[in-house]
């Protein structure tokens, strides 16, 4: 887990890997328009299933 803002920013600069998925949120009014909840659920399931289902 990342403990500081600097560690988080460094990881973002390094980019996505098997345990980090970066998403761009788009709003319409006060509701999230993109990404859709189904695609987010798929991404979360994929991350949870890394390391033979052990999660991260």
Image (cartoon, helix red, strand yellow):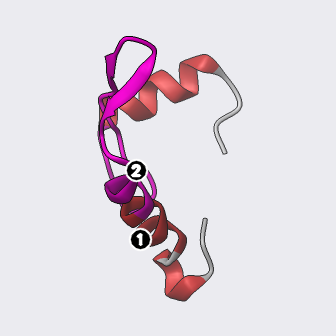
Residue 37 - label: 2
Would you call the spot at circle 2 few (<14 residues within 10 Å), some (14-19), or many (20 or more)?
few
- From the image, which quarter does the C terminus lie in? bottom right
Element on which disc 2 rests: helix
Which callout, 2 or 1, points at the residue further toward the start of the chain?
Answer: 2
User: Residue pushed farthest bottom?
Assistant: 52
- Outermost residue to the top: 29
Asked whether 56 or 26 is in front, the reply is: 26
Q: Is residue 10 above or below residue 6?
A: below
Q: Residue drawn at (47%, 61%), measured in percent from left and top?
A: 44
Q: Furthest-right residue in view?
A: 3
- Indicate the position of residue 46 as horizontal and vertical percent values: 41, 71
* Side of 54 relative to 16 (left or right): right
* Residue 47 % position (x, y): 46, 65
Q: Is residue 30 magenta?
A: yes
| Residues drawn in magenta | 15-41
Residue 53 painted magenta: no
Whole-percent x, y for residue 26 in the image: 29, 23
Q: Is residue 34 left or right of residue 7?
A: left
Residue 29 occupies which quadrant of the picture? Answer: top left
**Above/below status of 21 relative to 48:** above
Residue drawn where x is 32% and y is 56% of the image: 39
Q: Distance from label 2 to label 1 (Cα)?
A: 14 Å
Image mark for residue 30: none
């Amino acid at each position: 887990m990342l403990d500081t803002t600097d560690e988080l920013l460094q990881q973002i600069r390094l980019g996505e890997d098997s345990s980090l998925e970066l998403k761009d949120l788009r709003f319409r009014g006060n509701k999230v328009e993109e990404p859709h909840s189904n695609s987010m659920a798929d991404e979360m399931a994929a991350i949870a299933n890394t390391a033979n289902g052990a999660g991260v």
